[in-house]
Amino acid sequence: MPVDKAPPQVVFLPLGTPEEGASLQGWLYESLRRAILGGRLPTGSKLPSTRSMAEYYGLARGTVQAAYQQLLSEGYLQARTGSGTCVSEVLPDPTLNAGYVRRKVVAEVEERRTAPDTPWLKRLAEIEPIFSRRTLPTGVRPFFPHRGDINAFPIDLWRKLHTQQLRSSRLTMLLDADPAGLPELREAISGYLAIARGVQVSAERILVLGSVQQGLDICLRLLAPGDSQVWMEDPGYPGARQLMDISGISRVDVPVDQAGMQVEEGMRLAPAARLVYVTPSRQAPLGGELSPARRLVLLKWAAEQGSYIFEDDYDSEYRFIAKPIPALRSMPGAEHSVIMAGTFSKLLFPSIRLAYLVLPEHLIESFTRASALMSRHANSLAQAVLADFIHEGHFDRHVRRMRKIYAARADAFAEAAHKHWQGLIEVSEIRAGMDIACHLQVENEQDAFARLQAAGIDALPLASYCVDARAPGLVMGFAPYEERAIEDAARAVAQTLRG
């Protein structure tokens, strides 16, 4: 049962000025009494001492003592030993109790009021946002996807860099920052992209945001007005699909296979689409890569149509069987039509809430203005710490270390699946990422999902990523779990599904 928070201490409440010729004691008494009955002084609130009250309002202390005493005698105030004078929890007449009055008024207003009949609210009521409190996983139960191992993050090093930014000589870091992002961080991201993703881009074309979701939201607002058509992968990332549904655009679901989005099918379904959402380096959730041939076709189509491609560079760094695949944005001609998005929430820890867009030159000004209008700027202190983390080489070492750890856990997951899940769940080769889409070899996907959840297993049904029905499946994560935990959880999955 939640514990109620103590009411805030009231120091000095604005009481207005007494009328000319009025008794100061009577004015103070009546002002405090009205404040209590109106709820401006909540029950349990602590009043200032008589000395402090007298000094603040320029009254004689005896005047304040007399007003307090009258309110005490009538039951509006109560004196607590060691706690001073407080507003009574129950007022003399229950119908005048501030809490009662407020609850009654609120109840009457709520009974009459309904949510406005707006398109946004209608669409919002039809979905369960992927990031809502009800959809957040509890604890670190296996095999929840899309998250890494925060226990392996070098928190002591991060704390040291954070402390360095809070030196007295650097307090300007606490002021507002450039809405495009700290120049130091944008330079660091530029250098990282050139080495790790094959993208040669100046820092001026990088916009730092709070999340990839925010970047997609700006794209939809600025580049896909009204009911413009937008391609969406199917299956694909639910957060992107839900944002499209809320925005009011005309979403066109383009099927995905092992070679990524079926680009020619998208051209058939919506040849004049304004925007394409795609995860080319590691498709979410199936894990494949957009083939070179399809990449060329997609870029050629976007150039001819004047359309834009939103490249979500999802999980690209964690590739186990070879070097990471270069980003779509690194291909010739892509700089004019591809908007590349990346996030540090997957690579470092979720609550850092820092991401970036790589923008065509002609979109930099409008996107920066939109970002500034919507959120001013991303957390500048976190940006400064991250810039140091990258410049000093810690970021590269951390990613390389985590790639080895996740590769070992991917092997352990595959081995445990082969050992325990024969005839239940088929796991294909794990080539990259922090999770894998598995083929479920039982008939009822939702029943299997419910039974696993009841047994403490947090895998997600593949159907939650799909619009058109596919073979039953589960999206299962392995990155945060040590090998022994993977083995134990795999055994529990088998026992649950065999029932």
Image: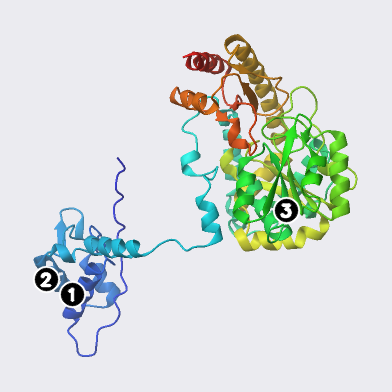
Q: Which mark lies nearer to you, 3 or 1? A: 3
Q: Hey, which residue is sitting farthest top in the picture?
A: 419
- Please name whichever residue, 420 or 15, is drawn nearer the observer in this view of the structure: 420
**Cα distance between the residues tagged 2 and 1:** 7 Å
The residue lying at 60 percent from left, 9 percent from top is 419
Q: What amino acid type is highlighted by mark number 3?
A: Gln
Number of other residues with Cα within 10 Å of mark 2, as a class: few under 14, some 14 to 19, many 20 or more:
some
| CB within 8 Å, label 3 to label 2 | no
Mark 1, residue position: 29
Residue nearest the viewer, comparing 337 with 18: 337
Rendering quarter of residue 177: bottom right
Q: Vertically, is 303 above or below 110?
A: above
Identify the residue at image location x=29%, y=61%.
Answer: 107
Residue at the spot x=73%, y=37% of the render?
255
Q: Amino acid at mark 2?
A: Gln
Q: Residues within 10 Å of mark 1 (few under 14, many from 20)?
A: some
Q: Return the residue at label 3.
A: 229
Sequence-first tag of 2 and 1: 1
Q: Earlier in the sequence, mark 3 or mark 1?
A: 1
Q: Are marks 2 and 1 in contact (CB under 8 Å)?
A: yes
Q: Tell me the number on the disc at residue 70.
A: 2
Query: For numbered disc 2, what is the local secondary structure?
Result: helix
Where the N terminus falls, by quadrant? top left
The residues bearing labels 3 and 1 have C-alpha atoms spaced at a distance of 66 Å
